[in-house]
Image: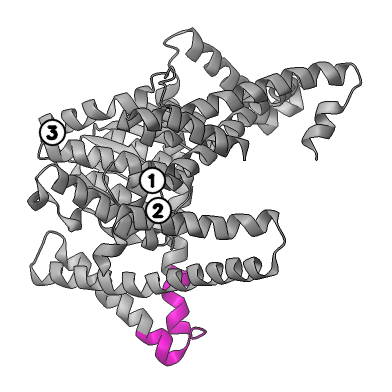
Amino acid sequence: MSSLFRRKDIMITIVAFCFGLVLVPYFLDIKELNTYANNLSKIVAVVTTSAFVISLYAQSRRNLIMVRQRSKGWPYQGFQLIIVFLIVAVGLILGQASLPYKWPIEAIQMSGSTVLYSIATFYMISAGARAFRARNTKVLLFLLSAVLVMLAQAPMTELYMSWPATIRAFLGDTFGKTATRIFAIGLGISGIVLGVRTLLGKEPATLGLQG
Amino acid sequence: MLTFILTIYYIRRGKLPYLRRVLALDVIEDAVGRSTEMGRPILESYGTVAFDQFVIASLSILSHVARLAAKVDNRVIVPIGGNPGSMITRPVAVDIVKSAYEAEGKGELFNENDMPFLSYEFFSFAAGYVGLILRERPGAVIVGPETADALMYVEEANAVGALTIATGSYISNVAVLACAANYIMIGEEALAAGAYLSKEQSRITSLRTVDIFKFLAIVLVVVGVILVQLKNNFIIDLLSI
């Protein structure tokens, strides 16, 4: 049975059918089709939720195998397994509002995420430092624009001179906006073309197949 | 609807359009070769969210990279996670890499442990990804359509001497990735990757539609600017319908 659903033509038929079911009610107000489209969205939500459970199972199984085989980094896998099931057990027994459940999330995970986000600043500085080399005319122009924009962004500049702000506004409103719009137009059209290729089975990788 | 019809027309017509070289895609083969010569694996990600256009396009790139790596008996490490949606895309990615190795007759080289699910929390995934780069020291890192975390991967990859190819799928990311990465796919270049890398005529011809619509957009912009100067809002009204 599963091999039937792995056939390219069957998969593409299902994708095309779902696409039609969602697209047609967008243009035509047909009550029955609207109901089917809504049901399809509910099915997607159920599948997503199921994917959580399946992923938890698959990940636990993988971690267990790695611990049992003493693969590279197995202590971390074991530690991860213990933490995951400990948090699930605490949540089920004491409830999600309990302190032992909230503490690891709020005190460890959230603060860790914040630290990582702030580290991005250092990565930016490091990338910027490498980019500050005018190797040709194009890069020189890019660099000059960057310096002027940065100059205008600095609060101190505003106190002493107004011209960097004018240049920044000009660069942003002309080149910046144009680039953003070209980017958006290109992405929008390419997205549709990619969708058509997918519907015609010309993007087999999406279905987990080889092209 | 017109885009839809035109694309189907060009796919059926099969006449090859002019195709501009996309350096970031052309260099993938060299990146795989370089990694293999250095005795290091290739690390590639395909985005964190569930299926959107960028993930679909990046999966095509993954398929191509996995096949190239299988040919030269190299490993492809694919960190997965960053969003609950990645739980849905993971089985597809695993299937793609597995079938790429099988297609090259190297099925025994495929190792699912090289495609770890790190975390569905965004920055926990980022920490795991950076850790993977530092531990595995890949020869090439192909960063998918990531957001705030993309720069971290590219910079760490640079630190371990890897060749970096990044997907600039968000306008706010493009400038910084252009500075940090060795090669970058900008916006639509990434979306055209599947067709471009396949070298298949019927897939490449579909890219003609993008050019036609971009040309139309340019004409509309130019005519619009002229008409607005003449106090005529025809184009603005037309586009506001």
Residues at circles 3 and 1 in contact by the CB criterion of under 8 Å: no
Q: Is residue B124 above or below residue A181?
A: below
- Please check the rendered image and state whether residue A90 is part of the magenta-colored stretch, yes or no: yes
Residue B223 can be seen in this image: yes
Q: Amino acid at mark 1?
A: Gly
Residue underneath mark 1 = A201
Relative image position of residue A138 (x, y in whole percent): 50, 11
Residue A46 in the image: state x and y as whole percent.
47, 74
Could you tell me the amino acid type at mark 2?
A: Ile
Q: Which residue is mark 3?
A: B36
Task: Report the chain holding disc 3.
Answer: B
Q: Position of residue A14 (x, y in %)?
A: 43, 59
Give the quarter of the image for residue A142. Answer: top right
- Residue projecting furthest to the right: B231
**Residue at 42%, 36% in the rendered image:** B167
- The residue tagged 2 is A12
Labelled pair 3, 2 in contact (Cβ < 8 Å): no
Chain ID at mark 2: A
Location of the C terminus of chain A by quadrant is: top left
* Marks 3, 1 in one chain: no
Is mark 1 in CB contact (under 8 Å) with mark 2? yes
Secondary element under disc 2, as helix, strand or loop, is helix
Earlier in the chain: of badge 1 and badge 2, it is: 2
Chain holding disc 1: A
Question: What is the distance, in whole Å, between disc 3 and disc 2 at their CAs?
Answer: 36 Å
Instruction: Name the quadrant of the N terminus of chain A.
Output: bottom left
Say what secondary structure mark 3 lies in: helix
Direction from residue B7 to residue B63 in the image, left or right: left
**Main secondary structure along the magenta-highlighted residues:** helix
Give the x, y percent position of residue B146: 44, 45
- Please, what is the three-letter code of the amino acid marked with disc 3? Thr
Residue range (magenta): A89-107
